[in-house]
Structures are given as structure tokens and as C-alpha cells.
Image (cartoon, grey):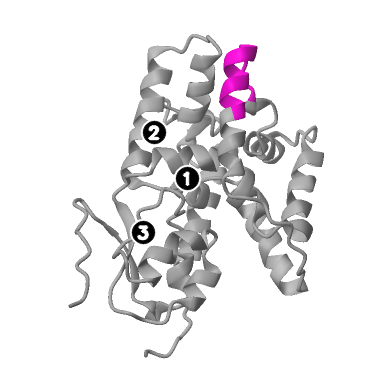
Amino acid sequence: MKAMRRRFPYWLLARRSVQLAVLAAFMYELPGLGRVVTGNLASSTWFGQLQLTDPFVALQALLAGQALGAAALIGALVVAVAYAALGGRIYCAWICPINLLTDLAHWLRTRLGVRRHVPVSRHVRYGVLAAAVCASAAGSTLAWEIVNPITLLQRELMFGVSSGSWLLVVLFLFDLLYSRRGWCGHLCPVGAFYALLGRFGRLQVGASGMGERSASVRACPEPQVLAPIVSGQAEAVRSGECMRCGACMDANPSAGLGMRVRIVARPRIPPA
């Protein structure tokens, strides 16, 4: 068995670079170019031409009976196709600013040795998603956007608006003191939406060989998705709940795990 060795967390560095670059694009102007993007993660216009719309926001708007322009609908379709093709909760790991907050809570939880964990079923997030969708349809409003912590945090960073600070503090303390990765891993309906949207995405974590993978499982925010390849029943993670974050690879480069695009799924051939 290969000895486990640690390395510089390249995947984590890449994710943080993308997340911070996206936030900076919304907050600052580039010399000579001015503002690259206007709006927010719910609806934005890049380079003054390309309009992009969060497909979950667009879905709520349509169910609420609100009219969306052709540009907004096309923007939602473009984003939906991109995330569906890549797969999983890649939005959560690479774009969502709340991930910065909850990852910090998890890091502090580990360093402080907080052991308390209130178990919450990972299926609850799908119930919250269903409730948000139904509330939008019944109330003729974008129900989730009223309390969406992603919008609240971006508003805090961009405009200094503090009306939603209490919710962000509660979310942080919940992850830190009560439930390990409780928000992103168990409750957030945005993550549930992208897990369903990216169920058949082609960017997958694949396995080769039978390296030691216990450290990878411990590092994974969604450890249940690694079960098929740890047990040898599959060569790739196909669950839409996989965040494509690369934490499993950062944790142990000797685990034989890698991220690759799989156009056609290869059947698993059982050993003779």
C-alpha cells in the first residue's frame, strides 16, 4: 500500500482564487477597463454585453408569475447548461461566497476541537428546496431570495448593508458549534438545486488503483459520494452532490484520485 503523503493544497488555492476573483469583479473596477460586471450573482451583466442569470432564481421568478426578458432567460439557460455539463455542486465549491464563510467555520471547528455535532439528514436540503419552490409559486414572489444568505453576504461586501448580518452570524455559529458542515452539506436549497441540475455532469472525480483513501474521505465535504469508488464498485463519482472541490485529492495525492472529463461512462468490470 502506498504511504500517504501530503502536498500543497493546489485545489484549495485554485478554488479560493476563483471565488475571490469573482467577488473582486463585482466589487472593483479594472484600470483601463472600468467595471467588468454589474449586478450580483443572481443576475449580472459581464463586459456590458453578456447577461447571466442564476437558473434557480429564474425558476422562482417563473413560478411566481414574473415576466423575464429574453436576455434573462437565455442567460439562465447558458448558466444551467454549463453547470449541468460540468456536473455536481461545482457552483458551491468554486463560486458561492458562503463557502468561504462555512469553510472558515469548519477550519475553526477543527482547530478548536469542537466535538458537538447535531446530526441533520442530507435530504433536508431537498425539502427546503421544495418548500422554496412551492412558496414562490404560492406567494408570487422569489421566496428564497428574501433570506438567501448568498445575496445577503454579497450585499454586505459590495455595499456595506448590514441588515442581514444576524443571519450570517447564526449560519456561521451553527456550522462552528452545532453541526459539522451543517449549512452547505445538509440545509442549503441552492446546493440541492445544483446537485439535481448536475446529476449527469461529465467532470468527475475518478479513481485508479487501490490507494489508501481514508484521508480523502475525511477531507471530503460530502464523504458519502466517495463510497462507490472506495468500495471498488465504481471508477468515478457520479453523484450530483459531489462538489468537485478537489479536497479528496489535496488530502492525499497517493490515493489514486483525479479530476477528469468523462464523455462516456465506462462500465465497471468486476475482478475475476
For residue 229, say whether it is visible.
yes
Q: Which mark is residue 91?
A: 1
Q: Locate residue 31 relative to residue 125 in the image: left or right.
A: left
Viewer-proximal residue among 26 and 5: 5
Indicate left or right for 116 with 252 as reference. right
Identified at 74% across, 57% down, the residue is: 118
Please tell me how crowded label 3 is: few (under 14), some (14-19), or many (20+) other residues with Cα within 10 Å. many
Mark earlier in primary sequence (1, 2): 2
Q: Amino acid at mark 2?
A: Val
- For disc 3, the marked residue is 237
Q: Please tell me how crowded label 1 is: few (under 14), some (14-19), or many (20+) other residues with Cα within 10 Å.
A: many
| Disc number lying in front (3 or 2) | 3
Range shown magenta: 131-143
SS label for mark 3: loop
Residue type of the residue flagged with mark 3: Val
Which of the pair 268/64 is nearer the observer? 268
Please name the residue that numbered disc 2 is placed on. Answer: 79
Q: Quadrant of the N terminus?
A: bottom left
Residue 192 percent coordinates (x, y): 52, 41
Q: Quadrant of the C terminus?
A: bottom left
